[in-house]
Image: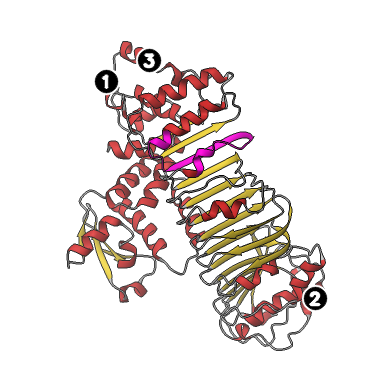
Amino acid sequence: MVTTDEKGPLTAKKKSVIIRSCDGDEFLVSESAAVLSTSLKKILEEKEDRLIHLSDIDNKTLAMVIAYLSTHADDGLSDDLKRSFDQEFVSGKEFDVLKYLVLATDTLQVTCLCYTVAKKMADIMKNKLVEWVRREFDIQNDYTPEAEAEIRRLDAWAWDDRQLEDD
Amino acid sequence: MDDVICHILSFLPTKLSAKTSILSRRWRFLWAHVPSLSFSNGSCLYWKSFSNIVPRVMFGHKVQSLNTFRLALIFFEIEHEIETWITTVISHNVKNLDIYLGYHRRWPKCIFTTKTLVDLRIEHVDIPVNGKAYLPRLKKLQLYDVRFNGDETLSHLLSGCPVLEELIVIGDPKPFSYNISSPTIKRLNVFLYQFYTRLEINAHALRYLKLHNCYFDDVSTQMLTSLTEADIRSHCALGFVDGLNNVKCLKLSCDKPLHNRALAYQSKPIGRFDNLTKLELVADWPILVKFLESADNLEVLIIREVDKKLENWMEPFQQVPKCLLSHLRSITIYEFGFAAHKFKMDLRHVSLPSIVIAIVWDGIVKGSRRFDVF
């Protein structure tokens, strides 16, 4: 399957790149969008081949990253529109989706998006209970109840709400 | 993976990121590797308990080079303690510094000579008149309710920022007139609370300009050759027009002129706008006509808060503007002062079949017709 990005056939005339996700699907992306990712830029500089295989990014995540890159590569859009696109891009997304996105943008070195996603994740984590964070990050609690009590005692400043503000 | 987690934790207040040590053994000391420290004493009752914690946490922090230090002090007592914390983070090569003080103070001065700073945001930290200012790596400067204490203070500060790209000035900077001169800034955003006498902008690399609530008696801009986008809301909005002729995208709100000089700005010629493709305007009919006549390549026109005097909007054109005959493809009108069916902007000469006029109240398109219906 070849999916064109938003600009469709217009960009096919320009230089384009095919990116394959770990699910095996292929995405056609304009080179100007692809090079906004520092890693993709490096790969393109090193090899002639226009097919890039990303073995650890799935279809859904890759499609989101490409939508972001294509929007930011569009010269016709104003800076203000791009900024509001960034805000809408992360709003309403599940924590789980953001988790894959932050890893993908870290791998692909899309600094701006990685920043926006990480910030959004931190915003969601505020006011969440310890159990919620453990569940979302697949963390096994390997402390004994005694060890947990000891940490709370040692880091009492963090657990005493009168001492430092939560936000 | 740990790097990514630290990146996420860097957006949390340090107190919250420290709490993640309870999650599991792997997370026990992760927070101490987060390249960011963020403290606020908003919920502290006593200065002493807060001022004990900050240095303790800073001491236990494992990061050699600190990205971000945020300090929000709703109240404070011992000023030299705060200076010490800031000096410490400066010695750890801090890049982003965000200092909020609950009330105006002229310290900490040391921040204005920090060589590693890339992003500086200060609120209520006043700038000394002629103190030393040298921030050789600073790219973004955000001044919220900062007093300059002298007409030359801002230009003095800017002259010490050789690679500055973005400047935000929000609030009440106090001098009566000032000068924003920088050969490197690309984005400028000014929002003021009061009336001032004179504003001068000299920034030939500027790409984006936003001036809201800027009430000046006198404005002066050199031609901003790199500018592509401008958003100006002011009673003397047209006073800035001299610098804007290269923009592609322009939002201009001409508030009611408050004095003769502003009136004079309204009547002077505006020059050519050959790159302009999108125009959003709050103005009366004569000003709209001026823009239509000077922007041959205009594609999108948005009109807001249309003058209540309906008859003004029915004046025929002396000569049909070129953009109406060529590129213009949509006109949208918001917050109209009268009923849609009475609107008869003279578009008889417009021959483009694709042009669409939408009239919108409260975000709902109430009348959307092709021009030829009118």
| Location of residue B217 with respect to B317 vertically, above or below | above
Regarding mark 3 in the picture, which secondary structure is present there? helix
**Residue B95 forms part of the magenta stretch:** yes
Q: Residue B128 placed where, x, y %?
A: 60, 43
Q: Judge the density around disc 2: few (<14), some (14-19), many (≥20) Cα neighbours within 10 Å.
A: few
Q: Is residue B15 above or below residue A41?
A: above
**Disc 3 vs disc 1: Cβ atoms closer than 8 Å?**
no
Identify the secondary structure beneath mark 1.
loop
Residue A127 in view here: no
Have a look at marks 2 and 1 and say if they share a chain: no
User: Which residue is pictured at 59% across the width and 24% down the height?
Assistant: B77
Real-space Cα separation, disc 3 to disc 1, in angstroms:
18 Å
Tell me which segment is drawn in magenta.
B89-112
Q: CA distance from mark 2 to mark 1?
A: 76 Å
* Other residues around mark 3 within 10 Å, as few (<14) / some (14–19) / many (≥20): few
Residue B263: give x, y in percent of width and height: 79, 70
Q: CA distance from mark 3 to mark 2?
A: 74 Å
Quarter of the image with the N terminus of chain A in it: bottom left
Viewed as shown, does residue B228 lie left or right of B239?
Answer: left
- Give the residue at mark 2: B312
Q: Are marks 2 and 1 in contact (CB under 8 Å)?
A: no
The residue beneath circle 1 is A142
